[in-house]
Image (tube, rainbow, N blue to C red):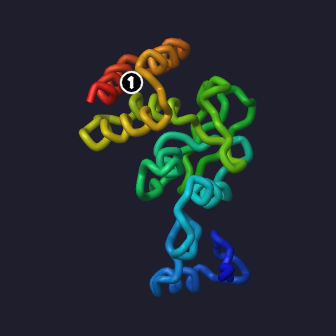
Amino acid sequence: MPRLLPDLLFPSADFSIAELHAARLDGELTAVDAGFAPLDCPSTVELRLRALAPLLPESAIVERQSALWAYGFRPYPPLRHQACVHAGVGRRVPGSVRLQVREVVLAEDDIVTRYGVPVTSLLRTAVDLARSLPRVDDVERGRLREILVASHVTLPEATAMLDRCRSMPNKRRAMVRLTEALAD
């Protein structure tokens, strides 16, 4: 039987935010960040990235916790999404209450485009998280391991990526954390 609703809904002239939330409370829809999807619609990378796309400025790249959520390694979206732009692009991309944007130096292979939305690669996402998390507990270490295993990256490949980034802060911290994650 064909689905009567699209697989991703946002508040619009057709459905108000109150109607969408009422349908969610009635068990007909599920929240996908700021959007809503029918219950029989599988939660995929494509669906999560499409839900995130309206929030992103034109040149933004999904990264860190938002990339984790988009790839499916995090069950819920972060309260404030994280994106980056290439450093030195010449114009400032504003952030918002829902979006933190930072300038980053990225190599060409640090970015992949999935379903029309640029997102940091699994390896770059793991490296950024290993560098930026204030502390890494067993859950975060396990998540780093899952990402590295899913990306089919070996420790020497991760080390080579870190060595390539000369001025990256917290490289030593990242190397220790990635080594611990792959040692488990």
The residue carrying mark 1 is 174
Indicate the quadrant where residue 135 lies.
Answer: top left
Name the spot of residue 57 as percent of width and height, x first.
Answer: 69, 48
Question: Compared to 130, does 173 lie above or below?
Answer: above
- Identify the residue shown where x is 56% and y is 84%: 18
- Identify the residue shown where x is 66% and y is 55%: 53
- Identify the residue shown where x is 57% and y is 53%: 45
Name the spot of residue 103 as percent of width and height, x first.
Answer: 61, 32
> Horizontally, is 139 left or right of 9 in the view?
left
Q: Quadrant of the C terminus?
A: top left
Name the spot of residue 85 as percent of width and height, x first.
Answer: 65, 36
Task: Name the residue nearer the viewer: 155 or 17.
Answer: 155
- Identify the residue shown where x is 48% and y is 51%: 72
Q: Amino acid at mark 1?
A: Ala
Extreme residue in the front direction? 1
How packed mark 1 is, by other alpha carbons closer than 10 Å (few <14, some 14-19, many 20 or more), is many
> Horizontally, is 74 left or right of 164 in the view?
left
Question: Compared to 112, does 40 lie above or below?
Answer: below
